[in-house]
Amino acid sequence: MGIANELQQTNFVSEEAKAIVNVIFTGNWIAYQQQELLKPFDLSMQQYNVLRILRGQNGKPMTVLAIIERMLDRTSNASRLVDKLVEKKWVLRRECPNDRRAVDVLILPEGLALLQQLDEIQNQWVKRFEHMTQEDLIKLNELLDLFRN
């Protein structure tokens, strides 16, 4: 369904205005779908992002500052997110041996197991792109990158 039908709005000030509304609407739609997917696991999108970043470290620790630099939502309070993940026993927080002022964060086996479960669910969600060709997806990514630049 097109954005005009979704919003029941036939006229936009310009194609640029329509594109901005469409990007915001679609981003919110995707965010809502992801929140619903994560809800049964008592996991926020930001917490999920932190876990995925830590998994990408392949067992190497990261500082909270390094995590922030890689987050999708850089306005998140990463320290608080890490604290919540520590409470849930999905990550470990420890003093950095090289710099006692810094804190290292490591994903625990329980966090990796959770991500493995979520990978299976995410793979089902990704099927929503089946109606798009690889060329469509490449173009979509190029257009989104172009828009941000």
Image (tube, grey):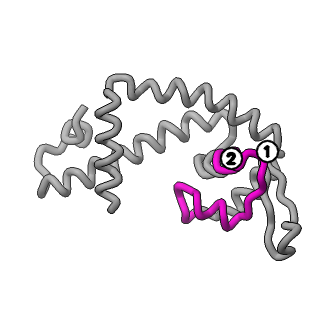
Above or below, 131 relative to 75:
above
Question: Which residue is at 26% across, 55% downward?
Answer: 20
* Location of the C terminus (image quadrant): bottom left
Above or below 117: residue 99: below
Judging by the rendered image, the residue that carries numbered circle 2 is 51
Report x, y in % for residue 98.
Answer: 85, 71
Could you tell me residue 111's position as x and y percent?
Answer: 76, 40
Q: Residue at x 33, y 23 (%)?
A: 131
Q: Nearer the viewer, residue 23 or 41?
A: 23
Q: Which residue is mark 1?
A: 90
Per the model, the C-alpha gap separating discs 1 and 2 is: 8 Å
At 55% from the left and 65% from the top, the residue drawn is 75
Under mark 2, the amino acid is: Leu
Q: Is residue 100 left or right of residue 119?
A: right
3 left or right, relative to 68: left
- Element class at badge 2: helix
Please name the residue shown 55% across and 63% down the image.
74
In the rendered image, which quarter is residue 110 located in?
top right
Mark 2 and mark 1 in contact (Cβ < 8 Å)? Answer: yes
How busy is the neighbourhood of tag 1: few (under 14 within 10 Å), some, or many (20 plus)? many
Please say whether residue 54 is one of the residues in the magenta stretch.
yes
Tally the numbered discs: 2
Q: Is residue 2 above or below residue 67?
A: above
Q: Determine if the magenta segment contains residue 24.
A: no
Q: Position of residue 124 (x, y in %)?
A: 52, 24
Q: Earlier in the sequence, mark 1 or mark 2?
A: 2
Which kind of residue does numbered mark 1 sit on? Trp
Range covered by the magenta-colored residues: 52-75
